[in-house]
Image (cartoon, helix red, strand yellow):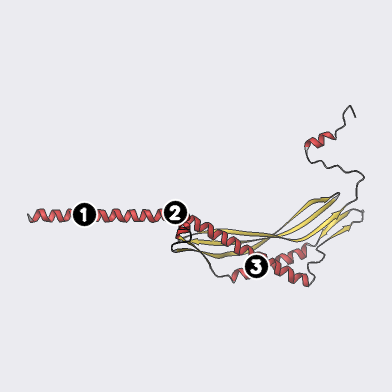
Amino acid sequence: MEDIGRIERRLKKKKLRRAAAAALAGLLLLLILANALTAKPLEIAAEESAKRIFSRLLNDSFLETMRELSSSGLTEGLTREQTGADGVSFLYIDSARLSVIASSVVSRAQEKLQNVDEITVSLTAGTMSRIALLAGRGAAVRAGIEPLGAVTSRFSSRFEAAGVNQTRYTAELELTAELRVMVGSSAHTVTVSCSSPVCEAIVIGGVPNAYTDVSNMEDALNLIPTEAD
């Protein structure tokens, strides 16, 4: 009888261990599913906050620097129309001063970036569950955002029509910063960019006696002489 009782106790212990292991496995599976469902909303919220906060930082750096350089006259006369010896007009662009402006803006942005501590973004568990009735309820789950690397700059320019025989030239400075978004134990990089115009000029040519706006192929075909003409 003692052997039978001992065997029954062993079987009960085995059943308890199996039940505990099954419960633990179920709990881990539930946590994995919960993390998969909630991590994405928090990641999206962190990315949007990062883009909003650091875009404003880059824009502020540009505006503050341009205000200072403008008071010293450095931003005046960046472009001017000149006429060569052959009588042909061309647009002169002071690339040296544009480089000075870009360097000053990047230095200001980098300084601001280094002074930023880690930013925390949080969402409640109810909001991350995507259930409308639970929105704003439950414990807060946090994600961290911190600057990563340096601010880089790039000039871009374009010419576009501004009227009859008039062309607008625009030079823009694009600032780019990389940020690291940390959600739990995972982290990924987010790139934030903003562009601001540095200078603009209108190049005016002679006014023609006749002007035709050909905006599509049908209009162009209508200009071809026919036998009736």
Residue 14 is tagged as 1
Labels 2 and 3: the sequence-earlier one: 2
Q: Position of residue 204 (x, y in %)?
A: 87, 54
Screen quadrant of the C terminus: top right
Q: Quadrant of residue 93?
A: bottom right
Q: Nearer the viewer, mark 2 or mark 3?
A: 2
Identify which residue, 83 or 127, lies in the foreground: 127
Residue 36 is tagged as 2
Q: Quadrant of residue 106?
A: bottom right
Q: Amino acid at mark 2?
A: Ala
Gap in angstroms between the C-alphas marked 2 and 1: 33 Å
Q: Amino acid at mark 1?
A: Lys
Q: Position of residue 149 (x, y in %)?
A: 58, 64
User: Left or right of 223: which side holds 172?
Assistant: left
Q: Nearer the viewer, mark 1 or mark 3?
A: 1
Q: Amino acid at mark 3?
A: Ala
Labels 2 and 1: the sequence-earlier one: 1
